[in-house]
Image: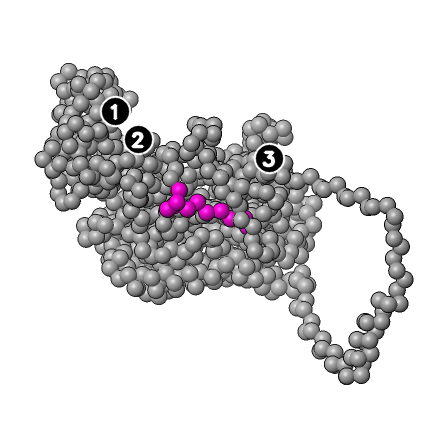
Amino acid sequence: MKIAFLIHNAYGIGGTIRATANLAGALAARHDVEIVSVYRGADTPQLPVSGKVKLTSLIDIRKDAAGCESDNELQQEPSALLPHPEGSVKAFTRLADLRVSQYLEATDADVVIATRPGLLVYLTECATDRDFLRIGQEHLIHGSHAPSIRAAQDRAIPLLDAHTTVSEADAATHREHFPDARTHIVALPNGVPAGAVEPSGSDSKLVVAAGRLIPVKRYSLLVEAFAKVAAERPDWSLRIYGRGPERAALRAQIDELGLNEHIQLMGPHSPIETEWAKGSIAAVTSDYESFGMTIVEAMHCGVPVVATDCPHGPGEIIDDGTDGLLVPVGDADGVAKGLLKLIEDDELRRAMGRAARESAQRYAPARIAERFEEIVRTLRPELLPPAPEPAAPAAKTAGPASSLRRTAARLVRPLRRKPAPVDPAPATAPTPAPLKALRPKASARATADGGLAVRLPRAGVTGEWLTLVGRLRGTDGTGAGERIVLPLAHPGYGKGPLTAVLDRAGTRLAEGRWDFHVERADDGKRARVAAALVEQARLLPLPLNTDGGQVSAWVPYTTAAGSLTLRTWLRTSHAELERIHVGEDSLTVTATLHGDAATLLDMDAATLVAVSPEDSAYDVELPVTVQDGHRLRCTLPYEQLLTRRGTARDVWQLRLRPVLGAPLVPLGRLAGDSVDRKRTDVHPARTLVHPERGPVAVRPVFDPENDLTLDVRDVTDATM
């Protein structure tokens, strides 16, 4: 059976694209499957598509592509077949009308699936004489579209052979709306594959949420609820992943509630599975969900979900009290109560996590593909191959006599053969085939002790003599401590991945960023290692490493270019920040001193130093309170800095001096899984008035080394 999925742009990111790729990949195991992207906006898809799925595009809109049609006159005109906003130059154009119609006239597909309202209209109004199955998909819910789109879709649905929704509740709504339609209306949930990540250990004190930052997701409600959680359990934190128009409002809400040390806005992250696995609880606070793909993703990672019992998806996915919790919609107290129930009960949380992993298997793409095949079988059974015939009965066992005759024949047959002629000339050894280009793509995982385990599939690393080489960025790799070489171990049998482990206890790496290459001694080739998955979850509960009298931390990560890199810190002394409190006119920090400086600590002489960017004579030095052991606390009044300013913007580094005359110790956050705290550990600015320069904004900011600074700048119209 040949199946074609019509999609707006398969090269972007979104739930419909992900769901289509998952189902297409599962069906491709048994059928001929094609994804037809009306538009092509990138060289390669941003979300993974199975290599067994053919990917076709009808209109190339890549700016630098030789066949770019952005300037085509028809591409400048809105669709003549679709209502606004589907029929707009931002969605479907006259050129789309033409190309989709031409495709439908020419396709030899047995089944064509439309994944969007505009495509449903095309499917029912173009190539009406063709005899392929027409199946529409609703990836939102019946009442969520603009009235013009809803009306056009309502006219199209009765003309389809089948129409699927992602929840049973929405399927019932559609059947009520089309009581006389011959269309087969049925629920077909999104297929969500289990990630390749290690499931959550349920021991991190972290709640995770992910999705577009839009009003319907109600992240503001989650922030309000987490304020109640933090008041009772200040050792727990919340991470919100995603981008969207609500980000600025959420940032302001977090600042206003003083939750900067408890809630982080992480931005988008792909693949998201590695981040779900870091959490012990997931949270969904939407007003409505058409399905709830993020719920299933979290469950696959062994993370129970606290979700609002909103229409339509969560209640069909979560078995309340077994693999997650359902709480009232729009109720911050209810959300907080649900989160605290799992926070306070470790055994319940772990049991629900195990049950969640098992429940999520219902949505494995292979199972959803089987449900899709049942839809086709109901409509056109001739399109699917018949069930396999039962195996023929085994032949009777031969008796002893016949067995002896066969044994004798096997022994005598070689003696009857003529000996092979002997070639007097030695055979010429065949020329070995050239090795394929190195294209290493690794999965990396932080180990339980903070080391690094790397796995490289053999597909991109052909050759026999291979090593994994790490080099300190900014060096040529020839100096002491600038290069590490790890043998890549071959699997004991089969064609499994090559592996290497960078042992934490036995390796001391200089501070910086280490880039990884695969080097092949067979031909002297080397190639940068791309990152598939980088798992950091095991780093969350780990303290700083202080073995050997030095303070160190490692964090593997994926660069913006998609390469595997290891960020390392190595210091003789370090002050690890525990808490930052931004007052109206001062900054208070609490930190623990590690390394050599801890042995020098003088509780009567330790100081916090704000290092002036202009001159050390302008440094601000304040006494520190030693609370217990090596734990320190200090308050820095902003007025102390304002009187010593020199430019429109000054950045003051914050350091600790353990005793009079001792070297300054960096103050920052190295423990955990973050390589860039400036982006995620954000604190509000306070505005004061300088007697000469006017309004001045002071904000604590982490620098590229994850050390704390104070950014002090004049407030102008551009910065207000």
Q: CA distance from mark 1 to mark 3?
A: 45 Å
Residue 690 x %, y %: 15, 20
User: Which residue position is annotated with label 2?
Assistant: 703
Give amino acid for label 1. Answer: Val
Q: Secondary structure at mark 1?
A: strand
Mark 2–mark 1 contact, CB under 8 Å? yes
Q: Secondary structure at mark 2?
A: loop
Residue sitting at x 24%, y 57%? 340
Q: Nearer the viewer, mark 1 or mark 3?
A: 3
Which residue is farthest front? Answer: 424
Residue sitting at x 18%, y 23%? 619
Q: Secondary structure at mark 3?
A: strand
- Counting residues from the start of the chain, the first of labels 2 and 1 encountered is 1
User: Which residue position is annotated with label 3?
Assistant: 525
Q: Is residue 498 magenta?
A: yes
Query: 704 and 681: which one is in front?
Result: 704
Q: Is residue 445 magenta?
A: no
Q: Is residue 24 above or below residue 97?
A: below
Residue 267 x %, y %: 37, 40
Q: CA distance from mark 2 to mark 1?
A: 10 Å
Query: 47 and 402: which one is in front?
Result: 402
Residue sitting at x 50%, y 59%? 364
Left or right? Give the position of 73 relative to 206: right
